[in-house]
Amino acid sequence: MSVTAAQGFTAAGIAAGIKESGQPDLALVVNNGPRRAAAGVFTSNRVKAAPVLWSEQVLKGGEVTAVVLNSGGANACTGPQGFQDTHATAEKAAEVLEGHSAGEIAVASTGLIGLPLPMDKLLPGIEQAAAALGEHGGEKAAIAIKTTDTVHKTSVATHGGWTVGGMAKGAGMLAPGLATMLVVLTTDADVEAPALDAALREATRTTFDRVDSDGCMSTNDTVLLLASGASGITPAQDEFAEAVRAVCADLARQLIGDAEGASKDIRIEVINAATEDDAVEVGRSIARNNLLKCAIHGEDPNWGRVLSAIGTTKAAFEPDRLNVAINDVWVCRNGGVGADRELVDMRYREVRITADLAEGGQSAVIWANDLTAEYVHENSAYSS
Amino acid sequence: MSVTAAQGFTAAGIAAGIKESGQPDLALVVNNGPRRAAAGVFTSNRVKAAPVLWSEQVLKGGEVTAVVLNSGGANACTGPQGFQDTHATAEKAAEVLEGHSAGEIAVASTGLIGLPLPMDKLLPGIEQAAAALGEHGGEKAAIAIKTTDTVHKTSVATHGGWTVGGMAKGAGMLAPGLATMLVVLTTDADVEAPALDAALREATRTTFDRVDSDGCMSTNDTVLLLASGASGITPAQDEFAEAVRAVCADLARQLIGDAEGASKDIRIEVINAATEDDAVEVGRSIARNNLLKCAIHGEDPNWGRVLSAIGTTKAAFEPDRLNVAINDVWVCRNGGVGADRELVDMRYREVRITADLAEGGQSAVIWANDLTAEYVHENSAYSS
């Protein structure tokens, strides 16, 4: 269902020949209205790909008619030509959709950094995608944005008469400030751009922004939310925000579950922190500790590596009051040896680490992956 | 030669039975004077091992008679008992060396976190080590502090009539704020504690503190510098500081060259930065980028990953003015494609990355390693 679960949207996914493999590589999502409100969140990396620079400008207007997404090339670090290519992409989409201007067309790209896009393939591909647009095209669009993803990712939440749906790609370079993550969310709720923006920012803050697969931040991350208003219903903001958050959380969990080379999904919950910022800082530090990520891969409940990661942060804590549980076994108590580590069962894919800072009442959850030989292999062999 | 290259020092390295393997695991370094001045630098991790907490106190007095070092156990996260064990270690050394107090004995430990030390083996080991002390014991001491090190590391610089020598261990958990790195430096120069401290801090700032093998900061890092004054010569401070820096740089280079599972040593030089802090921040960000570390392992000159790492920093730079060279080939110019990446020869162990921020006149060098399947294997199988 994906981006076409909500009324008022059509989508397509086709093979334009951008990927040498011949796999699908171009997606088009169109908002047929009546409303065309939109919000977007982009990478915080200061080296931004051309489509990010373009789409940031488009989103300032608060209206998006269509999104063109391509895999097979990130169009990042491609200089002025790269920006012209993105502009030409938007112009082409505006032309084939008729009656629209390039300034309403968002563009997102993913793939190799530092290579120009094959515009002789991409531009005809937009015509082909426009011809293939359909009310059931969401699935094909989700497939066309895959890179090293092994499966495509979609999610839908339906409430009383209105729907939020979405698609996501992203397997490596997952980290805060988002990740090589392209996400398009759609809704037929009748919501104006500022309310969309508020809901999207709050949702990404606690979902995509707390996914830290490999600590690497991408140049291309883009999360868009488009509202058609086709349901005619304007939900309460709280209810709408919760629906957006639920779809983002579901997609974020799918991203972690399909991270490059990973064999474990690690849920890190930091509890009893003095502030939420402290909880997030500690969670990220644990999430990025390569030694711990290796230990988890080896099913070794190595809590010493959790403590050494906590110790690198500026969060409020006393070393001799720290407690750590792995899969609910409190292997570290008061900064020292706790329950028998042999009690920890680490056979399953999901591993839960709980770090108790014993300072206050705030908490946060960060998702990460283990570090594996397969991750090394994929990322030493694949240029991206 | 190691720590006994300078006059006035004796050392020993023995197998006390702390390691189950029966390999050497206890080292003793004694300053026989006439001076017993000392300085120390310790991990900046806030979770500090008991021997670090102890030795920090000892060093406040500016005098150290002897250092007891053990491998086979870090004595970190071991609570009040761990601190008592360190205290007992110092007491035992003071007793067997006769006429000294525990307050003059520094202690350093390395190995597994979260396990108590076998004091029934360690304390008799100190007697055994004291009996084995000799003017040529430096080599054996260097061997006894190894953990996953494949070779022991020593360095000596001799100037007109005086010498600085040292030993180091450290293979994983190498990162700023030092690393699971134990280093003892000795000199027969006649230098007082404040001058030792100044020389050591400046030396570690640009050597051990710029080694970032795996981004993980240890609980046990300790670098000590002991001066016997036995040469009777007080060098100019500049000359002395340079000798200390040279020995630290040599040992730091050896640590990177023997990092766990590494197949490449990566020298990252950041040039034309606005400030030295900017240069270091950018260098560390590049050093810690797992995707880049995988690419280097695969001999892939993936400069896009260098740019995406730079983009995560707060350093002063404009994305479209960045230049990046890999092994002196400027593969990225003005934030876009530069020279043909096929020109980059990456067959050798040492890989040089140069990042030109085009902002100012400051620079810094950070050393790192690639990320390999062997690193994953060693650290998922070995609990430390």
Image (cartoon, coloured by chain):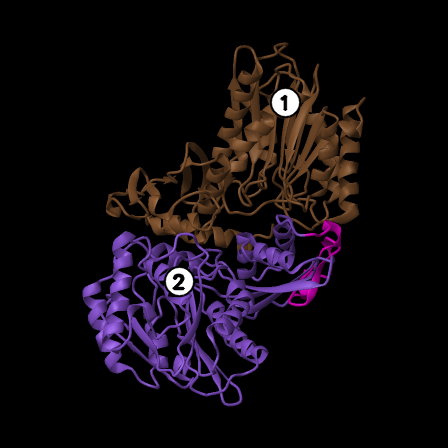
Chain colours: A purple, B brown
On screen, residue A232 above or below A38: below
Q: Quadrant of residue B198?
A: top right
Is B125 placed left or right of A156 in the picture? right
Circle on res. B349? none
Q: Are marks 1 and 2 on the same chain?
A: no
Residue A320 appears in view? yes
Give the labeled residue for mark 1: B196
**Residue beneath the point at 38% across and 55% down:** A48
Task: Give the number of callouts.
Answer: 2
Q: Quadrant of residue B266?
A: top left
Q: Give the crowd class for mark 1: few <14, some 14-19, many >=20 residues within 10 Å.
A: many
Label 1 secondary element: helix
Front in this rendered view, residue A37 or A117: A37
Between circles 1 and 2, the one closer to the viewer is 2
Give the labeled residue for mark 2: A56
Counting from the top left corner in percent of width and height, residue A344 is at: 65, 65
| Magenta range | A316-344
Front in this rendered view, residue A247 or A96: A96
Label 2 secondary element: helix
Q: Amino acid at mark 2?
A: Glu
- Chain for numbered disc 2: A
Counting from the top left corner in percent of width and height, residue B269 is at: 41, 37
On screen, residue B281 above or below A285: above
Residue B257 appears in view? no
Q: Is residue A227 magenta?
A: no
Work out how far the residue at label 1 is from the one at label 2, CA to CA, in angstroms.
Answer: 54 Å
